[in-house]
Amino acid sequence: MDARSVTGPPQPTLPPSLLSTAADHGGAGSAFPDGCSLPRTSSTSLTKSVTAVHDFKVSDYSLLDGMGVGRYVSSSTFTVGGRDWAVRFYPDGATAGCLGHVSAFLYYFNREAAAGVRARFTLNLLDRDGRMSQIINPYMKHTFSPASDNWGFIKFIEKSKLQPGSQYLHKDCLAIRCVLTVVIESRTVEDERNSVVVPPPNLHQDFGEMLKDGEGADVTFSVDGQLFHAHRCVLAYRSPVFRAELFGPLKEKATSCIRIDDMEPAIFEALLHFIYTDRLPDSCNDGRNAAMQHLLVAADRYGVERLRLMCESKLSEAIDVETVATTLALAEQHNCSQLQRACIGFMASPNMLGPIMETDGFNHLMASCPLVLKEILDKVSCIWSDNQHR
């Protein structure tokens, strides 16, 4: 590139008669004696993108080892940025040049698109506890197109690090996490002048402080000996059950203090926090399955529908062999149809039903909800039938 293309065209300069005035008043853009000022505008380049995470679980890894170079197992197709993607795992490597290693690639499926799709991604193994491993692969950048539809790590990890007892294998199962950012568009906008910055809404914070401070509280709950102060109107407008208890014909006669004996204080506190802020407390994000189950029961009991669905979603994400049976029993008892479908789908997955049937939770499920076994077997039958016709 020559010097002219680097420096650009000659820049305009102030008239000589104004140079000293501009210097005296701080340079271009400063006010001049006649009340004039140089106009100033600015613009910003904005790049819109979408980021998502997909976890690909590979079961029975020991059976895949030795399937052959270039052969792979694939995740389901997932959509990010309006495009379809999949993660492919090569137990014996993608090519003969990666002997002793496994390979992992990101694949792009929208081959009808003529223009390339820019993406930034990484693939990493999760440890037994579902956390990112200490060895983190770097992010990769690639423009995917019909002519270049895959990119990834040809030497993803040494096979010797995937032996029994490895930190990455749990019951012969490994998990690959894909963090993918897809660039949607880049555009330039003119900056607004003298724009007023409006802070984000903080109504939930104000109501949370009102609950915490207890100022103006006009009802008290005693939960296993622990007292909670609240505001009748807030509870009534957020829960039809509280409305009936506090203002309906069957309202509590002992209005000074309402006793609740069949709920843990921590669960009732989480319920109040959500009623006031429409958010789960931080204590509910620590992955404790039992606490989330109890909170779902409380939400169902008091008719807080959004909280009940949020608990369903959290429990669906945490399903595993040890908890799926008890979670399904809970879903059956409280008519949680979405959570029920998620549990039955997990139990009907290949090689899952046998280990699940050995758990204490499955025995409890059969004792409390015996009719659900038919639904599980019907689902298994449908999956096996589909596999035979492929």
Image (tube, grey):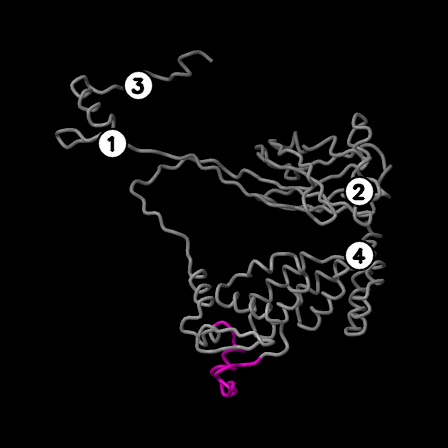
Question: Which of the labelled discs sits on residue 39, or is there none?
Answer: 1
- Type of the residue with mark 4: Ile
Between 369 and 318, the residue placed more toward the observer is 318
Circle 3 Cα neighbour tier, 10 Å, few/some/many (<14 / 14–19 / ≥20):
few
Residue at 19% over, 31% down:
31
Between 341 and 15, the residue placed more toward the observer is 15
Range shown magenta: 238-259
Q: Residue 154: x percent and y percent?
A: 73, 30
Circle 1 Cα neighbour tier, 10 Å, few/some/many (<14 / 14–19 / ≥20):
few
Horizontal relation, residue 39 to residue 132: left or right: left
Residue 121, compared with residue 334, is above or below; it is: above
Tell whether position 252 is magenta.
Answer: yes
Question: Which of the labelled discs sits on residue 166, or is there none?
Answer: 2
Frontmost of labels 4 and 3 is 3
For mark 1, give the secondary structure: loop
Measure the C-alpha gap from mark 4 to mark 3.
71 Å
- Type of the residue with mark 3: Gln
Between 145 and 64, the residue placed more toward the observer is 64
Frontmost of labels 2 and 4 is 2
Measure the C-alpha gap from mark 2 to mark 1.
65 Å
Measure the C-alpha gap from mark 1 to mark 3.
16 Å
Residue under pointer 3: 11
- Type of the residue with mark 1: Pro
Q: Are marks 2 and 4 in contact (CB under 8 Å)?
A: no
Measure the C-alpha gap from mark 4 to mark 1.
69 Å
Q: Earlier in the sequence, mark 2 or mark 4?
A: 2
